[in-house]
Structure formats: C-alpha cells, structure tokens
Amino acid sequence: MDDSGSGCRHTVEDDPIDQFENAQDAALTLRPDVPVYCFRPEVLRQDARNFVSSFPGKTAYAVKTNGEPIVLQTLADIGIDTFDVASPAEFAAVRAVSNDAELLYMHPVKAQSDIRLALEAYRIRTLALDHEDEIAKILRIVRALDLDPATITLFVRLQTKGQAAYELSKKFGAAPGHAVELLKRIDKIGFRAGLCFHVGSQVENPETYERALASADWVRSRAGVDLAGLDVGGGFPASYGYDPRGKKPVVPSIEEIMERLRHDLDDWEFSGLPLIAEPGRVIVARSLSVIVRVLLRKGRRLYINDGIWASLSDSWTGKITLPARFIPDPARKRRTGNAENIIPFKVCGATCDSVDILTRPFWLPETVETGDWIEIGHIGAYSLSLRTRFNGFYPDTFVEVTTPFESGEAPEGFAAIETMAD
Ligand SMILES: *Cc1c(COP(=O)(O)O)cnc(C)c1O
C-alpha cells in the first residue's frame, strides 16, 4: 500500500512524474523546449467532488473530454464509478483503471461489432440511440447473445436547441415526435426506456437545460411509457480567459446552474426518476495547464511550440480565450517595454500549416521575448484528447503541480480569468 500521501500514486503505469510547486518552478528547472503538461490532481478532485455533490443523480464522467490514464485514475480513486464512453478504446481506458465502473455507451450511432463488444465483453447495459435502425442493430446482438432485453436500458437521444460554444443538436438527436415513436418501440420490445439529451459544450445560459427538459416532458407524456431514467448530458461551463481591457465576464457558477437545474427538474416532475449527468469540461478543464515556449517573437506575433493540431484546438474551434501566464526566462537580461503593460499577442502554432493560428489572442506583458515560456491555463478539456501527430509534433510530457493555475501574482502571474458567479 502506498501511504506516502495523496500526491504520490498518480499513474496507472509506475513512472513517477516530477512534482513542482507551480509551472514557473517546472519551467525554470526543466527549461523545456517541448510543451509540458502540468497536472493538478487536487484541483481535479475538488472540481469532480464539487459536481458530484451538487448534481441530484449519478455523475458519469465523459471520457472523450480527457481520457488520460492519470485523469481517469484520479477520478476512480475518489469514487467516480460511472463513465460515459463512445468507443472500444474508451471502454478499455476505463477498465484499465477500474474493474467495476459502470460504462454508459452514449454514442447514438455505433458499429455493429462495437455493440457486440460492449454487450458481450464489457457487459455494458446502457446504450443511447436516435433512430429505429439502431434499435434493430442492438436487438440483433441481444438476440444473438441470448440476453434479456429487460436487463438493458436504451436511452433515446432527444434533439435540443440552445446556445453553447459547440452546438451539437445538428448532428444527433431525434425530433420530439420521432423520439415518442422510438420510446414506444423500445418499450414494446421489452427493453427499459430512458430519455437523454446533450445540449452542447460550454453552455453559459442555464435556460438551455430548461428548454430541453420541457421538450423531454412533452415526449414523455406523448409516449406514455415508464421511463427508467433521464440523462441530462454534459455541457456545464468552465471558466476561461477574457480581454483584460474590457469588463470582466461572469460565467454562471456550477452551483448556480445546478440550483436552477434542480429547480427545473422539480418543476417538470423529473426529480422522481433516476437521473444521470455526463459532465466533461466542468470537471477536468482546470486540472491541467501547459507550459509552452516562445520559439520566436515577431512584433505582436508569438510563434510557440504548440498549436491547434496539438493542445490548443478547443480554443480555436470553441472560440475560447485561454488564460495565459508569462514565465520570463531569467537568462535574458535585456528587455524592452513595460512589464505592467498587458497587450494581446497573436499566437502561431508549431506546424507549417497556415491555419495553425489561434483565433483568440493571448494577453501578456509586452516584454515577452523569444525563449520565454507561457503557461496556458484551464486546458484540461478537449486539449490532450484532441492532439494529433501532424507534422511530427506530439506533446506528451507531464509534471505534477500543486498550486492552482489561477493563484499567482502580476505581472509574471498575469492570467485573465473569468469569474464564476456564486
Ligand atoms: C461530449 C459529451 C459530453 C461531455 O460534454 P461537456 O461539454 O464536456 O460536459 C457529455 N455527453 C455526450 C453525449 C457528449 O458527446
């Protein structure tokens, strides 16, 4: 048994990770030329516990947000025992950290062979769909394996409309009338029937969930079948950066969104049902930052060793301004400009691709130079999971850090972070 403290057992493999107080210590000790991920297990534990304690149902972590073994292990260690998975690789990633975690296979469109693997090898008993042909695919495997449909819950994914950084209803989800038909068919075959939706990602307007619940209520009353559960999906927002010259934006806090959601669940009389949420971003965003190096400064442009094909695609597609902190190289003696003057820099990524330029600036002291480091905060969600090997750049170095990204002093400590309301 490892009794040397909470910070020591962090990997599924046994390679120890270097530990530092903060990213600046890591950068100045390692002087890295490659991007270095700073993992903050305590922040992850806090944000996960915070979600679990405020959601009135089961929390199923969405593995696609960040499926790194250290992340999954940390979550399993604090008792997260349900995971939203979408592929055989995700089934295996969860099984590698927990033998008995429950897997919810919530991808609405699945390969026949993957359905078989899920039901047979992984004993998954909860699946999502948004079309009758998917019911037929699942039923074929259920019959082939001689399973009792009553042991399986099929969630109908309902189309929703709302505002989110990512709007996902265009791709998946059955329209309400169609969802009614699907629920009836599922019930008639003898499966257990559930309703689910996923309103998108980085949803900052709590009314989005209410609209989805209103639609779910409409579907439930028309279908007239007993529901085995309601799954409200993910989409809960994390805090990011902003233009420090403007007004500090306020994102609704998770407490605020949850209070509203609990209220809406009561109002629409869903609180009696088994409830599930599939948070990703809100749980993992704060738990990682990345230290990047400025390979070249050219006027107001910074060329860095990471980019949209590596850790920063979420900032690009989600139009997110990432909070950034300056880590000046003490070896550089001559600097021009005023370190108190925070200005926007255009950020160019490491690859030769001309689209590899961030759509949102980094706000940094004007004294930044070639060879300095920048810590980019709150990149735990959709960053590592989306990185590619394009052009041969694949960041994969990790350290563990104890201090949360947002604690630090100006100007080196500059990081423009939105306030979460409370
Ligand atoms: C991506 C996804 C999630 C997680 O979304 P977040 O915005 O990261 O919370 C949850 N459920 C489904 C079905 C998803 O596709």
Image (spheres, rainbow, N blue to C red):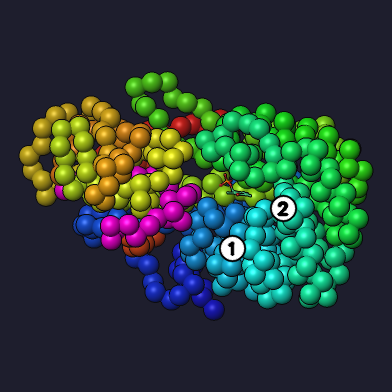
Inspect the image, locate mark 2, and give the three-letter code of the amino acid beneath it.
Answer: Leu
* Residue 133 coordinates in the image, percent (x, y): 74, 55
In the picture, residue 109 is in which quadrant? bottom right
Q: Earlier in the sequence, mark 2 or mark 1?
A: 1
* Residue 351 coordinates in the image, percent (x, y): 26, 51
Q: Residues within 10 Å of mark 1 (few under 14, many from 20)?
A: many
Which residue is depicted at the point 84% across and 55% down? 186
- Compute the Cα span from label 2 to label 1: 14 Å
- Asked if the stretch drawn in magenta spans residue 374, the answer is yes
> In the image, 156: left or right of 415?
right
Residue furthest toward the left? 334
* Residue 295 coordinates in the image, percent (x, y): 18, 48
Which residue is depicted at the point 27% across and 47% down? 353
- The residue carrying mark 2 has its beta carbon less than 8 Å from ligand 1: no
> In the image, 159: left or right of 268?
left
In the picture, residue 40 is in which quadrant? bottom left
Res 87 label: 1
Residue, disc 2: 129
Q: Residues within 10 Å of mark 2 (few under 14, many from 20)?
A: many
> In the image, 385: left or right of 146?
left
Region of the chain picked out in magenta, as a range: 371-393
Res 357 label: none
Q: Is residue 168 visible?
A: yes
* Residue 204 coordinates in the image, percent (x, y): 57, 32
Say which element carries label 2: strand
Closer-to-camera residue (291/94): 94
Q: Quadrant of the N terminus?
A: bottom right
Closer-to-camera residue (89/26): 89
Say whether marks 2 and 1 touch (CB < 8 Å).
no
Say which element carries label 1: loop
